[in-house]
Image (tube, coloured by chain):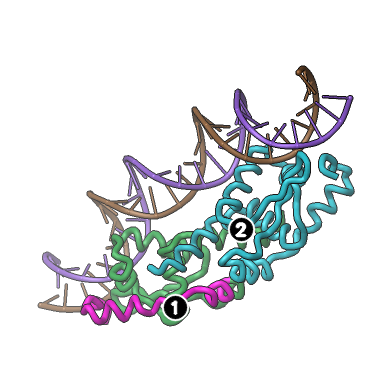
Chain colours: A green, B cyan, C purple, D brown
Amino acid sequence: MTQEIERAANIFKLLGDKTRLSMIKMLESQDYCVCEFVEIFKTSQPAISQHIKKLRDAELVQESRRGQWIIYSLNRDNELFSLVKSILAHLPNQDFNLKQLEEQGRRISCK
Amino acid sequence: MTQEIERAANIFKLLGDKTRLSMIKMLESQDYCVCEFVEIFKTSQPAISQHIKKLRDAELVQESRRGQWIIYSLNRDNELFSLVKSILAHLPNQDFNLKQLEEQGRRISCK
DNA sequence: GTATTATATAAGCGATTACTTATATACAAA
DNA sequence: TTTGTATATAAGTAATCGCTTATATAATAC
């Protein structure tokens, strides 16, 4: 069992959850504030925070604080980013989530 | 949450296990008998059988019986095969497993 | 300073996972 | 038809997962 297989399998474990997979796909287009994820996925804030933690621990995303908000972005320097990138190419764009949020006037906190 | 995201996430759940991921990578090169997997992964026969069942249920692999042996192959007609294929391109070849088996004279049952 | 807001972390819990052992099924060889 | 071999399935279990609620931390606004 090569180490590369194991590393890849760990990435797939993370992408094997539809919330996390959507997040990563969304982050391909633009950076997101935690508060936007909370609104979009209609889950509790801790649930979102825990998903993000996993992505952060795997260095798939990176944070940057802006005042009281924390903005996450895709870490394109990740060792396995080329794998991730080629996966994302097969997934439908998820930008409609944020558009919907704006249309419904629910994109509030960080804007 | 699009259905496509959910389908892809299900694939990643399957590939998120290093045994199953190795199997799929190996099947990219050639078909494999269950008994070869059992030898190569040094796990119990039921454990292997259960991994295969998951891959079969997702129609990622297909079986064909040859006498008392069952040979598995990659299902290249799977709806998401292009995704799988592009993933496999990023993984190291695993053919050494079978070579090792042969060198050690442990490739016995189905040959 | 205190209050409020955004995010993270901790603890608990039910569901799921990946194994185990035991058994069933399907075919082969005698 | 009996015996052996390959594979699948069933049942049980410890570990992990993804949520929940409660609380901690960090920044802003007053």
User: Within 10 angstroms of label 2, few (less than 14), some, or many (20 or more) residues?
Assistant: many
With respect to residue A66, does B83 lie above or below?
Answer: above
D21 and A88: which is toward the camera: A88
Q: Residue at x 60, y 47 (%)?
A: B53
Relative to residue B31, is residue B82 drawn left or right?
left
* Rendered image: mark on residue A93: 1
B64 and B57: which is toward the camera: B64
Q: Magenta span has B59?
A: no
Mark 2 chain: B
User: Within 10 angstroms of label 1, few (less than 14), some, or many (20 or more) residues?
Assistant: some
Determine if residue B40 is in view: no
Name the spot of residue A109 as percent of width and height, x first.
Answer: 24, 76
Disc 1 marks which amino acid?
Asn
With respect to residue C4, does D8 lie above or below?
Answer: above
Name the spot of residue C19 as percent of width and height, x first.
Answer: 61, 38
Q: Give the magenta range.
A: A84-111
D4 and C15: which is toward the camera: D4
* Rendered image: mark on residue B60: 2
Q: For numbered disc 2, what is the local secondary structure?
A: loop
